[in-house]
Amino acid sequence: MGLRTQVRRAVLGFAALSGVMLASGAIAPVTQPALAQRCTTTAGFTLFGGIDSEVRLAYAIDNNERRSTRARYYLKVAAGAVSPREILELEIFYPQGFEDNHGNFDNAEIEVREGTGRGGDVIPTSEIVVDSESNTIQIYFEDAIPESTSFMVVIDKVRNPNRYGIHYFHLDALYQGDSVRTQIGTWPLDVAAGCEN
């Protein structure tokens, strides 16, 4: 008898014995309460096409299901992505297709945090304006973000679109001493991707 046949018989015998023991009550099935699942999507790896690596910004999304009203976007900006100057304001452009598929920021809570993790201190803002007509989110700071600071924009309670899609969110910044905003980079958001539990 070959090794493969012996292994197969041993597995089948164990499965049969387990079934008998379970049916007789010798082994009680263990059930655990369902735990809340945190669905997270992070920036992936692109082989061909997509955003150039020099301008691609990292991100993470919690509760990234279709039609979710609890989606949370972590839009990260590493210190190396910005010019070594103070930042006075930010402007994020999002595509019309996001709203065409019923995604919106109507009830969103937006803040800017230090660092690129999920923690970090909140950077005080003086005003945040979501303009669905021009598809922009404008963020004005109480004090300028110091040079060479990593930060992230956290957008909580986003209403995700009805369908999956890759939506390019572009970031511009107004640096101290400039009169016009400069492009920082792009987040290629994998929105409403769902998750595997």
Image (cartoon, rainbow, N blue to C red):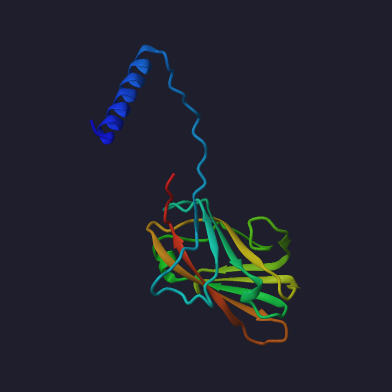
Q: Residue at point 46% right, 57% down?
A: 160
Query: Residue 35's spot in the image, x, y percent?
Result: 52, 36
Q: Residue at x 42, y 47 (%)?
A: 196
Q: Residue at x 61, y 82 (%)?
A: 181
Residue 16 in picture, x, y percent from top left: 30, 21
Labels in figure, total: 0
Nearer-the-camera pick, 53 or 82? 53
Q: Quadrant of residue 9?
A: top left
Relative to 25, is 156 on the left or the right? right
The C terminus: image quadrant: top left
Residue depicted at x 70% and y 80%: 84
Which residue is at the far front?
Answer: 1
* Position in image of residue 109 (x %, y %): 61, 57
| x and y, in percent, of residue 98 in the image | 43, 65
Quadrant where the image shows the N terminus: top left
Q: Is residue 50 left or right of residue 75?
A: left
